[in-house]
Every structure is written in structure tokens, then in C-alpha cells.
Amino acid sequence: MADNTFLDTIKRSSIQDLISGVRGYANEFTLEVKPEHLHEVLKTLKQEFGFNYLADITGVDHYVDEGRFEVSYNIVALEHKQRLRVSTRIEESDPSVDSVVDIWGAANWFEREVYDMFGIIFNNHPDLRRMYMPEDFEYFPLRKEFPLLGIPGSIPLPEKDPPKEYN
């Protein structure tokens, strides 16, 4: 959790004009950033404020007309004992943001996972391919329009009952 003093310092820094909003709940804060400023903001937070640990990247499908997808970066400044979330909203018509693998190497698999589940493209990613689903799978399972029981016939599934030799 970021304390208010640390957050105020960030809001008065060189990236203050790139932050479009701040949300807070239970002393945890989220910086809202437009997609075109995301890479610069995250790079500055690492270099100038010591957010050297990328804990996770997550995706959310809000299933709305404007800003359908949200990508959130959970980062930690270990030395300062501060945690912060940086979030951006992107459109369904262009579901992409710049990769941050050049800032945190750990972003490599996090970005691949978000791509695999939501179809969000990370520009300049060194190896953006699916992690869990087959490479030729046409769907993204964590999108809201994905059927709860999956797409019949989209991938071969095991038989309902195991073969008798396993009983």
C-alpha cells in the first residue's frame, strides 16, 4: 500500500501530467493512465521512485462500449515498502498496449498470459504467443462473451468416462 505522502510525491513529479486519475480504497491506490503514456509512467516509477518489483499484470473485461479492457500492473518499491497499481483502459477495436518487458523482465510471462486469456496485444513483446491454449485456438477464454461451458468442438476433450483400463 502506498502512503499518502509517497503518492503526493509521485503526483507532483515529472509524470504528473500523464496521470489521468487516482483511485484509492483501504489505503491502496491505483494510478489511472492513458495507454499512450503507460510505458513512460511505468519506466519513471521504476527509475525515479524505486518500483523495482513487478508483482503481476492482470486483465479485466468490463464488457462496455468505451474502454472495454483494463490492464493493471501491480508494482512494489521494496526499499520504500510501497505498493501501487497502475491501470489503463483500452478499446475493443484496438486491444493493445506497449510491452514493459524492457522495464521488468518478469513482464514476459505476465503479458503472454493476459494475451492468451484476453487477446490483448503487447506491442514490441519479444515472444508474444499463447501459454495455455493451443496456438491455433481462435478464442480468448476470459472475455465475457466466451461461453461458460466453452465452445463445443473447438478443442478435443477427453472422453467423459476414463477408458476401462484406468478403472
Image (cartoon, helix red, strand yellow):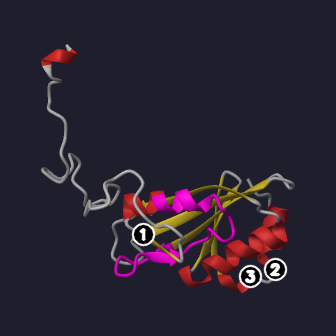
Q: Nearer the viewer, residue 133 or 40?
A: 133
Name the mark nearer the viewer: 1 or 2: 1
Element class at badge 3: helix
Q: Amino acid at mark 3?
A: Gln
The span picked out in magenta is 89-112
Dot in front, 1 or 3: 1
Q: Secondary structure at mark 2?
A: loop
The furthest residue to the top: 167
Residue carrying label 3: 16
Q: Position of residue 122 (x, y in %)?
A: 49, 72
Q: Earlier in the sequence, mark 1 or mark 2?
A: 2
Q: Which residue is mark 2?
A: 13
Residue at 76% over, 75% down: 44
Tell me if label 3 and label 2 are in contact, CB under 8 Å.
yes
Residue at position x 39%, y 71% in the image: 68
Residue found at x 83% / y 72%:
48
Q: Identify the residue under disc 1.
A: 120
Q: CA distance from mark 3 to mark 2?
A: 5 Å
Q: Is residue 59 in sight in this rendering? A: no
Q: Which percent across, then down, holds residue 146?
A: 25, 57
